[in-house]
Amino acid sequence: MTDVDGLVECLLSTGLPVYRYESLKQTSAYLVWSEERSGDGLSGDNVRLEHTLVCTVDLYTKDTLAAWEREVQRALERYGVANRLNSVQYEPDTKYTHYEWVVEVVWTL
């Protein structure tokens, strides 16, 4: 499992602009990631052995063929980021398709 820095590296490897929490005005495809909550981690003998962080990764694209969606999914797999595609929504106001992944990464305290 990768850590937060590895997640950012993974997202940058797609070639898309990457932002944390919110983006600047964009006219093409881009990614936004944010931390959501502490994950389940790993415990043993009543001690937390590994902390994890649940994050969301959001892809906004006007590409109707989902080419960027496939590139993000391949990058997540290449970097060993635990993930699931949570939702796909069309946003009529901006004409963007919004893909949202929930990912879990190691959180070093």
Image (cartoon, rainbow, N blue to C red):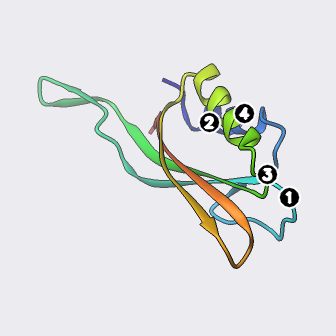
User: Which label is found at residue 43?
Assistant: none
Q: Residues within 10 Å of mark 4 (few under 14, many from 20)?
A: some
Residue 14: image x %, image y %?
A: 78, 35
Q: Nearer the viewer, residue 69 or 80?
A: 69
Q: Secondary structure at mark 1?
A: loop
Label 2 and label 3: CA atoms lie apart by 23 Å
The residue sitting at the left extreme is 45
Q: Residue at x 74, y 74 (%)?
A: 94
Badges 3 and 1: C-beta atoms under 8 Å apart?
Answer: no
38 is higher (above) or lower (below) than 28: above
Q: Earlier in the sequence, mark 2 or mark 4?
A: 2
Residue pointed to by mark 4: 71
- Can you see residue 108? no
Label 2 and label 4: CA atoms lie apart by 14 Å
Q: Residue at x 12, y 30 (%)?
A: 46
In the image, taking residue 25 as reference, residue 88 lies left or right, namely left
Q: Earlier in the sequence, mark 3 or mark 1?
A: 1
Badges 2 and 3: C-beta atoms under 8 Å apart?
Answer: no
Q: Nearer the viewer, residue 18 or 62?
A: 62
Residue pointed to by mark 3: 63
Residue pointed to by mark 1: 28
